[in-house]
Image (tube, coloured by chain):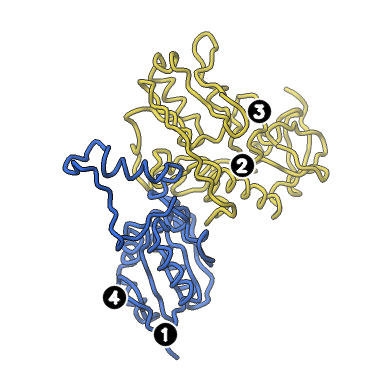
Amino acid sequence: MSDLIKFKIDGVECMAESGKYIVEAAADNGIFIPTLCNMKGVKPKGACRICTVRINGRLMTSCTTPVTDGMEIESHSEDIQELRKSIVELLFVSGNHFCPACEKSGNCELQALGYLYQMMVPRFPYEFPLKPVDAKSAKIIKDQNRCIFCKRCIKTIKDEEGRSYFAFRNRGHKLEVVLDEEMGNKIDDATAQLAMENCPVGSILVKEKGFTVPIGKRKYDKAPIGSEIKL
Amino acid sequence: MSKPVIATTSLAGCFGCHMSLLDIDERILKLIELVEFNKSPVDDIKTFTKAVDIGLIEGGCCNSENVEVLKSFRKNCKILVSVGECAIMGGLPALRNGIPIEECLHEAYVGGPTVQLNKDGIMPNDDELPMLLDRVYPCHEIVKIDYYLPGCPPSADLIWEAVVALVTGDPMKLPYEVVKFD
């Protein structure tokens, strides 16, 4: 076992194993720092910036920053919360997130963050970009309207030889996460299901499945995201 | 002292938000004690007959008539509230945003799989019909909106809490389950 070190989050004394990423160390101490692109057990990327905290006056992503001895982390101050809320709002306006018509509604992490920060309306104008829905695969629908480019599917959904089913295509505002056509047709049910579960939003859906859990019983219907972490 | 006045309208909406307003059950009796309704589908008053305190807007703006009605609400109401996803972000009608209007009309009246009787391929073109806008606009992109109640529809509790808070000035009680986007 590695050494235990002490650090502080918003003045609260915490302990963790040296070298742990702040997000995980915080969770071990019952403190929730929101994440979107990050997944437990997968190398962090620091793409979505939702987990931004302030350390020594600098804003850092807590999913990629290891905790060090005596570190003082600011996570729940008003300006950082506001910053996270603005990121959620940007994600909502830059895609087409029609919650009422989405199969993932109620189980969507982006939507849950909207609830957490009580987003009544985004402060930015809606972009309404024209994006395709790829339903060529026999098993999976890839709805580009809802993709937030978190890369979780690319990093976690692989075949026996380690090849990813999903990949980035194009760059800049043309960037999209696409499903390999050939591999997409061969994907087995369990992997397809995992792809849907690992997607934080409703961009990856298993065909002929959806709305299986009624409103009121879905993951984020009763309790906000992160409640499972709070001690 | 006279009661605060409320007006409501459904623009590019489905009347679901109005149904949710009616879903306050027996509190509707309290509501009538608390406020008076003016222009609204609820009492079928077609035009504003006095200055209104609170305007509740359901639906976004998809045509010229929606814009006109919304502007008249802004003119006649002290406070405007966007009620529901359509008013806030266009909602389901905004699924057509990004698709050229000709293509939408063609799909609906000429080329769509369920079009059978329109042999001459006529599209609605009467001068009396409101003009479709190039896309569906959220209400706050047309006029200033003061408050937003998300949901599809916003729950009866949310609408009730908001209206009571606006009328009485008391703070809103918003439990987590009440604010939802679907």
Which class describes the residues within 10 Å of circle 2: few (<14), some (14-19), or many (20+)?
Answer: many
- Mark 2 against mark 4, which lies toward the viewer? 4
Q: What chain is the blue one?
A: B
Element on which disc 1 rests = loop
Element on which disc 3 rests = loop
- Mark 1 against mark 3, which lies toward the viewer? 1
- If you read the primary sequence from the N terminus, does the residue marked by circle 2 or circle 3 appear first? 2
Dot label at residue A113:
none
Measure how far apart labels 3 and 4 are at the Cα level: 57 Å
* Pick the front one: B166 or B146: B146
Measure how far apart labels 1 and 3 are at the Cα level: 58 Å
Measure how far apart labels 1 and 2 are at the Cα level: 45 Å
Dot label at residue B3:
1
Which class describes the residues within 10 Å of circle 1: few (<14), some (14-19), or many (20+)?
Answer: few
Q: Amino acid at mark 1?
A: Lys
Q: Are marks 1 and 2 on the same chain?
A: no
In x, y percent, where is residue B171?
Answer: 54, 71
Residue receiving disc 3:
A44
Relative to residue A186, is residue A119 drawn left or right?
A: right
Q: Quadrant of residue A42?
A: top right
* Pick the front one: B1 or A131: A131
